[in-house]
Image (tube, grey):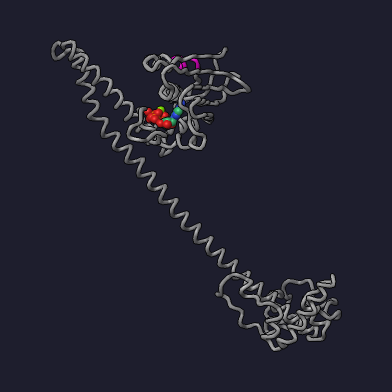
Amino acid sequence: MIHLEPSTMSDTITCPHCGRAVAPQARFCGDCGVDLALAAVTAELALIGLDDVPVSAPIAPEVLVPRMGETMIERGLLQPADLDRALEHQAACAASGAPILLGQALLELGLVDRVSLDQVITLQILKLQTALSTANRELEQRVREHSRDLRQALDRLAELNHLKSNFIANVSHELRTPLTHIKGYLDVFDEEVLGPLTPSQKDALQVMQRAELRLETLINDLIEFSVAARGDMSMNWRVVCLDPLVLKAVERLEGKAQLGNVTINVSLTHPSPLVRADEEKIGWVILQLLDNAIKFTPCGGQVDVSLACQAGQAKLAFRDSGIGIPIERVSEIFEPFHQLDSSSSRHYGGTGLGLALVRRIVEAHGAQIQVASEPGRGSVFEIIIPVINA
Ligand SMILES: Nc1ncnc2c1ncn2[C@@H]1O[C@H](COP(=O)(O)OP(=O)(O)OP(=O)(O)O)[C@@H](O)[C@H]1O
Ligand SMILES: [Mg+2]
């Protein structure tokens, strides 16, 4: 909108700072090095007397940039009555189907000259630019502040997580020592070293041994979890055949399934896939997924365990006809200590650690775990792991 005479658009222009000639397309003056764009804006501001652009004013540009007619009145270039005339002329043109801008209406009526009009438009553009750059600066500042707050919150969270893992590890180790004594004496009683036991004493002893075993398992899981959470999980890599691990888990949990009247069906593939894995850990994962499938399947339901091999991947699936999981809650089940039914009257035992640890172990194997589920119809948990005898 700045009106340039044809002569000023020729081969050279003058540096507004040192007065030397510079090429029109140059960004900086070759002699004094001044930023020509910046110098031009400063010169323009000086020319039109714009030294009062508010820098810390409210950031909405429309607040800062007044309407053109009002600006002209403010600067004494136009009388209010003339503005009304121009607006009427503009409305009449619009009504006759040939709309024009206000500036054009003012020119047509001879109420302002071209130079004044260009000055006012330039002023508006510069004000708008200033408002925009102020808004940008404020926005950048706010983004910087929010990023810093977020980083601090994340650091704090990581620190708390670390403290939690340390706490769990310490407490678990402390619990393990007295439990070892309890277990030792239970064994001593069981072997009747301290004298013969009556049948009812033997029954009571069995209850205590089962409880001790549950405590021991829980403490071991807690220790494993805290180790994994700190990223210290050590892997004992071997070539592992998955079939025996599946069969072993089924054998271990058959009693539990029978108690709940849940049928387990197993389908294996031949040849059995071999994977690079930590045998103990992957066996534990299989046990956890089968345990969940049985636990969350009501009486009379069934659990299908299948092992298939496709495209260099072994797919180990645990399908149950159990209570299912609402789709929007699937991500929660991998959170440590998280159980979907956390009400005090929950029917299912456990601590909610199983799947949190399962996920870490699966990830450490470069494998994936997938879940599909429908409330009331059942769930499928699948582990996909690369095979080495594909
Ligand atoms: N097959 C499943 N069907 C329905 N819900 C499931 C199934 N497996 C897991 N869940 C849900 O996910 C939650 C977390 O499972 P996770 O194995 O981590 O804990 P848990 O079985 O409750 O306790 P733990 O495994 O520590 O003994 C369960 O409490 C349950 O709400
Ligand atoms: Mg579990």
Q: Quadrant of the N terminus?
A: bottom right
Farthest residue to the left: give it.
195
Q: Quadrant of ligand 2?
A: top left
Residue at x 75%, y 86% (from the top left corner): 82
Pick whichever, 230 or 142, lies toward us.
142
Relative to 155, say whether 295 is above or below. above
Name the residue at 63% across, 73% down: 130
Question: Looking at the rendering, which quadrant does residue 93 occupy?
Answer: bottom right
Residue 267 appears at what percent x and percent y? 53, 14
User: What residue is shown at x 27% (from left), y 30% (from top)?
Assistant: 176
- Quadrant in which residue 198 is drawn: top left
Task: Identify the residue at horizontal 56%, vertical 22% (top origin).
Answer: 314
In the rendered view, tell whether residue 116 sits above or below residue 252.
below
Q: Position of residue 35 (x, y in %)?
A: 69, 74
- Front residue (pair 21, 203): 203
Whether residue 198 is visible here, answered yes or no, is yes
Q: In x, y percent, where is residue 52?
A: 61, 82
Residue span colored magenta: 242-247
Q: Main secondary structure of the magenta part?
A: helix
How many numbered marks are there? 0
Say whether residue 372 is left or right of residue 127.
left
Viewer-nearest residue: 268 or 365:
268
Above or below 378: residue 112: below
The quarter in which the C terminus is drawn is: top right
